[in-house]
Every structure is written in C-alpha cells, then in structure tokens.
Image (cartoon, coloured by chain):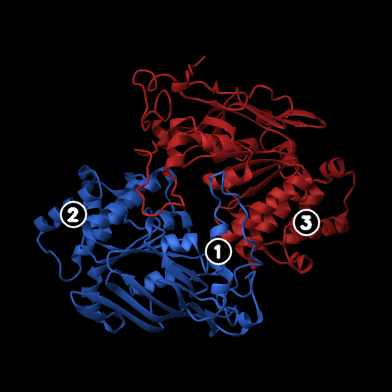
Chain colours: A red, B blue
Amino acid sequence: MTANGGALLEITDLGVSFTTDEGMVRAVDGVSLAVHPGRTLGIVGESGSGKSVATKAVIRLLPANARIDGGSRILLRRAEGEIDIARLPAGGRELRRLRGGDIGMIFQEPMASFSPVYTIGNQMIEAILAHRDHLDRRLGRRFDRRAARDHAIRMLERVGMSNARLRIDQYPHELSGGMRQRAMIALALSTHPSLLIADEPTTALDVTIQAQILDLMLELQRELGMAMLFITHDMGVIARIAEEVAVMYLGRIVERGPTREVIRDPAHPYTRGLLAALPRVETSRRRLTPVPGDIPSPLQRPAGCPFHTRCPRRMPGLCDREVPADTALDARRSVACHLFGGRAS
Amino acid sequence: MTAAPLVEIRDLAVHFGVRGKRLLQKAVGHLRAVDGVTLTIRRGETLGLVGESGSGKTTLGRAILRALPVTGGEIRFHLDGESVDLLALEGRELRRFRRHMQLVFQDPYASLDPRMTVRDIIAEPLEAPGHLRRKREVDERVREIAARCRLNLEFLRRFPHAFSGGQRQRIGIARALVADPEFVVCDEAVSALDVSIQADILNLLMDLQQELGTTYLFITHDLSVVAQISDRVAVLYLGRLMELGPTREIFARPFHPYTRALLSAIPRVEPEHGFDPIQLRGEIPDPAHPPRGCRFSTRCPFVRERCREEVPAFREIAGDHFAACHFAEELAG
C-alpha cells in the first residue's frame, strides 16, 4: 500500500467522532486507503464497523454532531489538480460541485437520492445541467436542456429500463424497487463521475434483482472507466464485485488485500471468524462457527486491538494494551494484528 | 422413513382486497397473496420457506398461525393422536390452541415491549388460558427456558433496550418457546443480525430443536441460511409453491427453472464458484395481477406456449421432491 502515486482517492489517517448524549463515539479511527482509477475497492464490515461513516466522510455527508479529525486527509486527484476534501468548507460551492459531479453516490434506499415531488427526468436533467462544466471536461460537450433530456433517456435505457422515454416522466414512487434502484444508478452515472461510492446498493433487493444490478454496475464501470468504493456487509457480494477488499471492525481496517486471496487465506482472526461464520449453500444441517461474544458498544471501545475482546488468539498484556499497526504480508496484502508482529510505531 | 405430519395444509388461499387509487373507493380487485398452497410440515423437522418480495411467504406463515384471515382451504394439526381443524376453531377454543404454536419475528428491536422486564416478556405466553398460574411456577419455567437459550439469568430483571441484537433475539426465542409449543414459525428470525452473531442464533435454534423436538417453519429470503438450517425447502413465487423437496436435493438438483435461477443468483464467497446467474427477464410481476398459466412464465428463460395457457400441476418428480413445471423432467435432464 505504499505506491499510491496513481490513486484517484487517497485517504490518510481518517478519524471521525460523534458527540452523543451518552458520550463520545469514535466511529472511524485512523483509516487509510486508496482507490485507483477504473478499479473497485470493497469495504466489508458489520454493525459499528464504521464503513458507512468512513465513506460518508469522503463526500462530507456526515450529520452535524460528527467531527473529522484535524489530521485526516482525503485527497482526490483530478485532471485540474488535487484537492483535500477534508479541508473544504462545509456547505460550500466546491463540495456541492464535487457531489454528483466527480463523485457519484448510490445508497441502499433510492429515495435518499430522489425527491418524491419531481419526476425522475426532472431530477436527472437538473443534475446534468448543474454539473455541466464537469461533463464538458469529461466528454468535451456542452449540454443544454434538450441534450440533457436525451442524455438522461440514454442513461435510463443503459441501465435496462424499458420504455425509458415514458418512464422519464414518472415520479419515483411509480417505479418498483428494482427499477428505482436502476434509476438511481442512472442518475449517479449521468454526470460521468470518476469515482462512484456505493453504500449497500443491493442489500434491500431480491437476490435475482441483485444479480442483475451487480452485473450492470460491472458493465458500466468497464464502459465508463470509473473507480468504485463499494460498501457492504455481504462477503459474497464483495467476492463478486471488488478486486480488492478492506475488512473493517470497530472503526479500523484490520485486513486488506486482493479479494480472492483474503477469502482463500484470511490472516486476521476477525476475517477468519467472519468467513467461518458464514452459512454455506454446500453444507446442510451443520453447526456453524460463530465469532464468540458480542460486538462491543461503540461507547466502550476496547483499548488496544479493537477485536481482542472476542479474539480466540489474543495475547494478554499485548493485545489489550497496544493497538497493532498495519503490517505488510506481501506487496499487496496487509494486516493489523500482533500475531503478525504489528507493533505500533 | 418420513416422520408423521404435524401440520397439513390443503389448498390454502389468502386474498386481500385491493383498494382503488382514489380515497374511499371500494375494493377493485383481489391480491392473491397465497393462492392454493398444499403442504405438509412433518413433526420435528425444519421446513425452510423461501421466496422473494411478493411471494407470500410471510402471509403463508401468519395464515398457518391464524394471525390473519384465511380465504379458503384447510389447516389440520395432528396433536396427541387427534386431528384438529384449525380454521374451525373460534373464540376460547382458538385461544387455548394458540399455546401449541408461536412466532419468532425478524426484528428483535421492534417485537419486544420496552416497558416490560425481560422476565415479563418471556412469561407473557404463559398468561394464555390453560397455563401455569402460580408465580413461583412461572418464574421457574422462565428461568429454565432462559438458561436453555443461554441468556444470563441476571438479565431477567432488566429492560430489553439495554441488549444487543443477538441477546434480544435470544429473548424473542425464549418467549416463543416458554409455553413448550409444538410448532414455531421463524419469520426472517436472523435476517437483521450481523453474520458473526447470526451463526450463534442459528446454532441455538438447531440445539433447541434437538432438545425439545420443536417443529420449525423457517421463513427467509436468504438461501444460504435456509441451506444451513432446513431439512426440506419449499420455494414460493407469487403465492404458489414452485418446488418442495429435501434440502440437499433442492440445492444439488433443482427441478424448477425459478429455483435454478434463484440459486444461481446467490453471490458465493468460494472463488471456485463462478458467478453466472441465470438472467431473468424483467421484474417480479405485481401480485395483484399475476400472469395466467404458470406464474413464472413471464420471466422463465425456458417458457413455451403451454406455460402461458395452462397452470402446471404441483407433482412429485422424484422421491419426495415436488415441482410445478410442465417440463421439469426435460429441463432437469
């Protein structure tokens, strides 16, 4: 993870805390990662892992009680130069231009992207026109209202919507769940973002529809050459969509590497536990191997390694005291675990 | 070899009235949420019930518990050598019968009353007619089932909001099992839980079944979970059974094109499984306007003329393995 020269997005030492009535919640604690052009980084984690918060920080869509650490850096490299998103003024023009322009977003719930009171087409056309300059740079053409409508129809057709010419004038609630998800993808991609952030985009969908949407996303990625940051709790979905995976637990990345290798030969005891706990289609009526204990409350983060309270291989006196540092296993894999020698530097 | 039937369901139908778009408009049609399901649930087994949105799986589960009005058909329970016609029971008789059947919900957060202590939540089903009356007996029974569900007995005096998702689901399971029911419907019982916790709850359900001999109808959209916990699997699509058979058979040799598509769409973690889902055309049809003929005909990759005209019979294709497809043998061959 050293040669990040070509990275489109480079996050260094990201920390996010929330002030709540019950105290301070440290949701993301020192996360560093890089996303490369045209490639997909998957982030997998359970409740409280901070995967969603970390990615919301990238587009600065955090609630008002959240604070990004002063030392965090979120670098986005564009043709016009490099910007640190962590330093952009909240609610400013630059952030607005970034969201839905260079960075597209899709969520589990499509109604988070659409307003219920405007037609799908209206919202797509507004988005295209709002990011006219960005599109000019990416495609070398200037959109007027009519061209924007044609472009929106083409995008809706592209995501497999039949009768796009009619559907474009429908309201979001008139579409089925799968169609709404497609419309949201069309909306996010209509501005040709260089980075797409997808937060559990298929979790609420039926499995046959999920398969269609995943295929569609891979196809569009190839076609448009965009990078993806794909967040999910589902290892199977990660295996399908991401070349590289980062496993998060209680706000930290505990392991990362090429997806196939991490799944075939997980290093961190948490990754091992997570894979062993998965029900498999191949075996029936088998006892499963759960990860012992509960995920600790974010209000009571364990000291030392966040996983030590549940780890079958914890070393008393070390794991409960010192936070393990990221240790390289080879050129592309790393793990944050004392079993692999990771001492905090 | 097969166990005795506990619940026999014949031609079960649950239809809902569909209102028009305008306010106060009279019913304009019927949503056939469950439309002629025939199914036997065997004593001591776990029958997995899978289906996507609109399949009617939750409605079917609730109908078997008489938690919603049934339009037609028959449900028989076989208990202590007697055959009980569930749909004929009314009033006090029905309330007395309810102790034989229970429900475990999906969302342990929503299904527990926040103002009751864990002890009172678990004890609630014992208040139904025909149960323990004395407080000491109730306490003893609650402690016994809580221990079986591996709940810390200290927790009994607390309120549910203090607990994690996994603990809350243990409370929900203890509550369902406290009155020693023969039959439990688990409706997406582990779907809201994290993977590392879900495995623990699935193990608990399997252990309790071994100890208590309970029969489960396990409803879920998650096919890997169903593969793990079920002895047999029933596949529902738009209110009708598409396939039913032993779990291993269903997953190794599915007869119905819908089952095959469903299984091929599971994203697997094993790298040796290439992901090549059978692409189904279009969307799941509106259950208020199901297709004529075979309900799956609008999306089936192997559809032929006959499928659009004639409803396929639900028939035994191989030993104990049923499917509703005109061309099951041919397509499986």
User: Which one is in front in this view, the residue at disc 1 or the one at disc 2?
Assistant: 1
Residue for badge 1: B260
Q: Position of residue A173 (x, y in %)?
A: 63, 65
Q: Quadrant of the N terminus of chain B?
A: bottom left
**Amino acid tagged 1:** Arg
Pointer 3 with pointer 1, Cβ within 8 A: no
Please name the amino acid that badge 2 sits on: Val
Disc 3 element: helix
Q: Earlier in the sequence, mark 1 or mark 2?
A: 2
Q: Badge 3 is on which residue?
A: A155
Judging depth in this view, the residue of A105 and A114 nearest the camera is: A105
Note whether A232 is above or below A77 in the view shown. below
Label 2: which secondary element: helix
Q: Which residue is mark 2?
A: B142
Cα separation, mark 3 vs mark 1, equals 31 Å
Tell me if mark 2 has few (under 14), some (14-19) or many (20+) residues whose alpha carbon lies within 10 angstroms of its own. many
Instruction: Tell me what residue is drawn at x 35 percent, y 58 percent.
Output: B111
